[in-house]
Image (cartoon, rainbow, N blue to C red):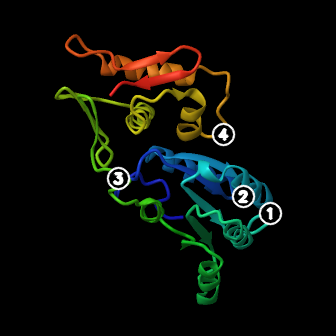
């Protein structure tokens, strides 16, 4: 696959997005996961078709897009897509296929796939296709988020508080955006894990607390109030 791990960013992806990648070729799956995570996505990988269908059925609201390889063990991507649509699961589906025949493409679209990509493909093209599938109306996702004196631009990932730029890591940015989309709401750790970490996360780790602590430190200053609260035993709240 040419330029698979090129880290150029043709477009800024919608943020706080979680992808289920169903691919049985381990090297390819791992490479795609690394590349997508560098773009700011959270990615789960499943290598078996039937297991993927079970996961999608039980966790349909956890994912913003499903990337399906066409040829999979136990159940192929075509059948998964058909079953998803039969169950009224409307998550966008992008199918990866080595078959370029017109009939194959038509069948994929007829089964409910939103788009397809013929192998080999560049990572930039995959990223652009995902971005197109995840594009949502401005009424749902405002161009710039505001909470009190904090401003966050999802397109540039620029965070500003009281006129001061706040340098953030990808995870810190994801946390801040999630809090800003849920102002004055107590957010529990499970919600944060679901949206910002993949399912290989070890639940007893204090990774969430560490990232929140770092984010709170960056948001704090002598001339501003501490707006990120810890609600003991539950989670966190960003005061608007």
Residue at horizontal 45 percent and vertical 59 percent from the top: 134
Q: Secondary structure at mark 1?
A: loop
- Marks 2,1: beta carbons within 8 A: yes
Q: Secondary structure at mark 2?
A: loop
Q: Residue furthest top?
A: 222
Seen in the image, is 45 located left or right of residue 31?
right
Circle number at residue 193: none
Q: Secondary structure at mark 3?
A: loop
Q: Quadrant of the N terminus?
A: bottom right
Residue labelled with disc 1: 73
Q: Nearer the viewer, mark 1 or mark 3?
A: 3
Give how far across and how far down residue 137 sits, in percent.
Answer: 36, 60
Residue at horizontal 37 percent and vertical 35 percent from the top: 180
Q: Which is nearer the eye, 84 or 37?
A: 84
Marked residue nearer the N-terminal end (2 or 4): 2
Residue at horizontal 26 percent and vertical 29 percent from the top: 148
Cα distance between the residues tagged 2 and 4: 17 Å
Q: Nearer the viewer, mark 1 or mark 4?
A: 4
């Amino acid at each position: 696959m040419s330029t698979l791990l090129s880290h150029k960013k043709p477009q800024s992806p919608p943020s706080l997005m979680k992808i289920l990648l169903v691919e049985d070729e381990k090297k390819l799956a791992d490479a795609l996961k690394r590349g997508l995570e560098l773009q700011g996505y959270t990615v789960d990988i499943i290598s078996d078709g039937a297991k993927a269908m079970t996961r999608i059925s039980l966790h349909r609201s956890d994912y913003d897009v499903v990337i399906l390889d066409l040829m999979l063990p136990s159940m192929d991507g075509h059948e998964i897509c058909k079953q998803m649509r039969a169950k009224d699961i409307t998550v966008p589906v992008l199918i990866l296929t080595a078959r370029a025949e017109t009939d194959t493409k038509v069948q994929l679209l007829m089964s409910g796939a939103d788009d397809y990509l013929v192998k080999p493909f560049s990572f930039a093209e995959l990223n652009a296709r995902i971005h197109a599938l995840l594009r949502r109306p401005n009424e749902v996702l405002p161009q710039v988020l505001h909470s009190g004196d904090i401003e966050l631009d999802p397109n540039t990932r620029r965070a500003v508080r009281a006129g001061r730029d706040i340098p953030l890591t990808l995870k810190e940015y994801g946390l801040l955006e999630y809090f800003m989309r849920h102002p004055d709401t107590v957010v529990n750790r499970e919600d944060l894990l679901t949206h910002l970490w993949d399912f290989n996360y070890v639940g007893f780790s204090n990774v969430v607390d560490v990232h929140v602590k770092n984010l709170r430190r960056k948001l704090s200053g002598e001339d501003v109030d501490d707006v990120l609260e810890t609600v003991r035993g539950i989670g966190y709240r960003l005061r608007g």
